[in-house]
Image (cartoon, helix red, strand yellow):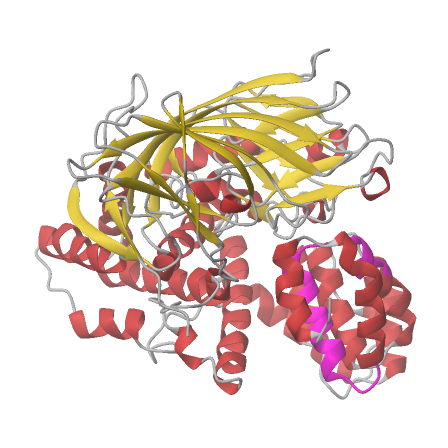
């Protein structure tokens, strides 16, 4: 029987707060249990990381030296770090090599690295290398890149994968600054979640500084044949040479988006905001690594129709990166605020009709996912505040945190009025900058700084229903769109013998097309599917969101004309949001269950661990 492992997390800023950075006004002397870290920061906490690394593509490993600066309790006798499958060569305390202990490996948590120290110890240094199976790292062959000439490496540290490439206290409640020196092949460019170079150098040696305290899940590294294209004075895009022009076009409104965000909730506090377009195997739409959002190429639709994803990652520069969930049980604080902020950015830039279409689509998906989770016995996971004890925190990455969290915050806006709620949110980000937040602490702030401050009484029972009860409250906001009503009219016309080519679809946005495809009824015939495909070219759509929904419908209706595209899409796309529903639909279908298994066997080497970790179980894959 394995013991339950917890860590005590002190909510604090690093002692080496960066020059010019005003320390957070928030001070919480209490400690919080983090079930996903071995660290005991109440005894010894990391405040700064000095990282030296050599990226070895031939052997698919990183050779690293991590020097960790510490802040210790007066009785400190050890510092405990999180590691996963790292090869620890030696550990120094000061200049003296010491004996260390590497604990038994846990499937999710990895192994505790325990280093003896004294209260006066200011740093420890670990010499190590990553293993072949390091879960955060994806090593791509040249053929898996757009250019087909050079290999590529990228990391994905969220939620607890940073420990597989750096020995660190891998908890969202522990923040530290870092600097790094990274050696890569001279023909490649290295980038991190830090101040970044904008061109290659002859030596392949790069220096990085992150002078604002971040949690370990925001550590990020990418190495590849990359170019930079500026968009504004403080923004730009990195991509492979063959992709850079398309990426720069797609994101040319980025500066306007940053300004829109600032006008809502205060100054952007990270200096630059750049985007890196990764190869297709990246498992997420985007990852909000500070200063450098990692983005999937699936948002390069050619018409800027999917840039709400950029608004989402930009919003994380406030919600998540600036004010961070203290543990992964509080994940909704990161994502609920981010979806709310994203929606407000899109409304400010493109109008209420546009943002309400986005919100309505999200609502549809949320309701469906809640039903699925309740039906498969995961009803407790439809609560905002989760209990992820003895589980992988990735289990909490569902639409609950994102869209139920958004609806809860929207309900508060509708309750008190937008002006009062905006003032609360802006103060929330400003007063709690560079610190962490628990759900319970947030509820207290909501009461004091929104309700009491405005002479109002908070309905505590309703707040608790939203946060601690499964499903959606009966009075939850339900976003609607008049534009979708018109889309429904066109689907009705088609179902009553109107030719697809005669439907009134001129000027439809991607959101309207997405709603149209989602509304295809279960009894649609193959001939009708072909008529829609012939008229609107769904199988060859360049919009990955619309294409995925069409492929789901194609599986559901056994529309074989789309199956070649289905195979191509699954082999060449690694984004989990698209993979899971497509494989799930195939597994559930009579026509495609065996096809799912064969496609997965071919495609799996192209997927990141984050995706395979979900899909292996779904497909009963035996490694």
The correct choice, above or below, for 233 with respect to 174 in the image is above
Residue drawn 41% across and 70% down? 2
Residue drawn 33% across and 66% down? 385
Residue 518 visible in the picture: yes
Would you identify the image quadrant in which residue 266 lies? top left
Q: How many labels does the image show?
A: 0
Give left or right: position of 425 versus 274. left
Residue lying farthest top?
Answer: 202
Name the image quarter holding the N terminus: bottom left
384 or 202: nearer the viewer: 202
The correct choice, above or below, for 512 with respect to 498 in the image is above
Helix, strand or loop: magenta stretch: helix
383 or 63: nearer the viewer: 63
Give left or right: position of 575 versus 234. right
Q: Position of residue 34 (x, y in %)?
A: 32, 56
371 or 596: nearer the viewer: 596
Residue 505 visible in the picture: no
200 is within the stretch colored magenta: no
Residue drawn 29% across and 34% down? 117
Q: Position of residue 259 (x, y in %)?
A: 45, 31
The stretch in magenta equals 568-592
Q: Where is residue 291 in the image (x, y as percent from the top left)?
A: 50, 30
The correct choice, above or below, for 216 with respect to 617 in the image is above
Q: Position of residue 321 (x, y in %)?
A: 40, 40
Name the image quarter holding the C terminus: bottom right
Would you identify the image quadrant in which residue 505 lies? bottom right
């Amino acid at each position: 029987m394995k013991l339950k492992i917890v860590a005590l997390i002190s909510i604090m800023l690093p002692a080496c707060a960066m020059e010019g950075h005003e320390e957070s006004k928030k001070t919480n002397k209490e400690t919080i249990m983090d079930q996903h870290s071995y660290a005991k920061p109440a005894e010894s906490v990391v405040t700064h990381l000095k990282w030296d690394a050599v990226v070895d593509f031939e052997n698919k490993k990183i050779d690293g030296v991590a020097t960790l600066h510490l802040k210790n309790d007066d009785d400190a006798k050890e510092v405990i770090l999180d590691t996963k499958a790292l090869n620890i060569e030696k550990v120094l305390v000061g200049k003296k090599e010491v004996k260390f202990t590497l604990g038994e490996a846990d499937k999710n948590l990895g192994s505790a690295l325990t280093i003896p120290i004294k209260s006066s110890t200011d740093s420890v240094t670990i010499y190590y290398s990553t293993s072949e199976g390091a879960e955060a790292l994806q090593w791509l062959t040249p053929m898996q890149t757009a250019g087909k000439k050079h290999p590529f490496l990228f990391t994905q540290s969220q939620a607890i994968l940073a420990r597989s490439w750096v020995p660190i206290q891998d908890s969202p409640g522990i923040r530290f600054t870092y600097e790094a020196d990274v050696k890569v092949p001279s023909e490649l460019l290295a980038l991190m979640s830090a101040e970044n170079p904008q061109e290659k150098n002859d030596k392949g040696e790069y220096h990085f500084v992150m002078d604002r305290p971040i949690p370990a899940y925001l550590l990020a590294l990418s190495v590849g044949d990359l170019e930079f294209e500026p968009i504004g004075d403080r923004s730009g895009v990195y991509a492979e040479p063959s992709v850079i022009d398309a990426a720069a076009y797609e994101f040319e409104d980025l500066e306007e988006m940053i300004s829109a965000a600032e006008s809502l909730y205060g100054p952007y506090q990270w200096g630059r905001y750049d985007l890196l377009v990764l190869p297709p195997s990246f498992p997420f739409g985007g990852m909000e690594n500070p200063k450098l959002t990692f983005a999937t190429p699936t948002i390069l639709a050619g018409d800027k129709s999917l840039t709400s994803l950029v608004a989402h990652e930009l919003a994380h520069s406030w919600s998540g990166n600036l004010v961070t969930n203290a543990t992964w049980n509080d994940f909704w604080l990161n994502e609920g605020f981010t979806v709310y902020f994203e929606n407000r950015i899109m409304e400010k830039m493109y109008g209420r009709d546009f943002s309400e279409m986005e919100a309505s689509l999200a609502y549809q998906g949320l309701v469906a996912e809640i039903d699925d989770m309740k039906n498969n016995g995961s009803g407790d996971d439809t609560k905002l505040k989760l209990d992820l004890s003895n589980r992988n925190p990735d289990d909490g990455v569902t639409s609950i945190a994102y869209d139920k969290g958004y609806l809860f915050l929207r309900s508060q806006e509708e309750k008190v009025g937008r002006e009062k709620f905006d003032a609360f949110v802006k103060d929330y980000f400003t007063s709690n900058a560079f610190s962490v937040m628990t759900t319970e602490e947030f509820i207290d702030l909501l009461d004091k700084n929104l309700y009491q401050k405005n002479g109002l009484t908070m309905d505590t029972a309703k707040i608790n229903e939203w946060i601690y009860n499964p499903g959606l409250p009966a009075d939850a906001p339900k976003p609607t769109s008049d534009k979708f009503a018109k889309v429904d009219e066109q689907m009705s016309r088609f179902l009553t013998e109107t030719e697809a080519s005669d439907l009134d679809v001129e000027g439809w946005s991607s959101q309207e097309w997405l709603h149209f495809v989602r509304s295809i009824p279960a009894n649609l015939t193959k001939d009708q599917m072909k008529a829609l495909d012939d008229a609107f070219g769904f199988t060859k759509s360049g919009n990955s969101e619309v294409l995925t929904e069409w492929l789901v419908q194609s599986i559901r209706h056994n529309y074989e004309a789309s199956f070649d595209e289905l195979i191509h899409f699954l082999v060449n796309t690694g984004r989990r949001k698209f993979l899971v529903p497509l494989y799930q639909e195939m597994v559930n279908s009579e026509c495609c269950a065996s096809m799912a298994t064969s496609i997965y066997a071919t495609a799996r080497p192209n997927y990141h661990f984050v995706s395979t970790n979900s899909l292996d179980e779904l497909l009963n894959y035996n490694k």
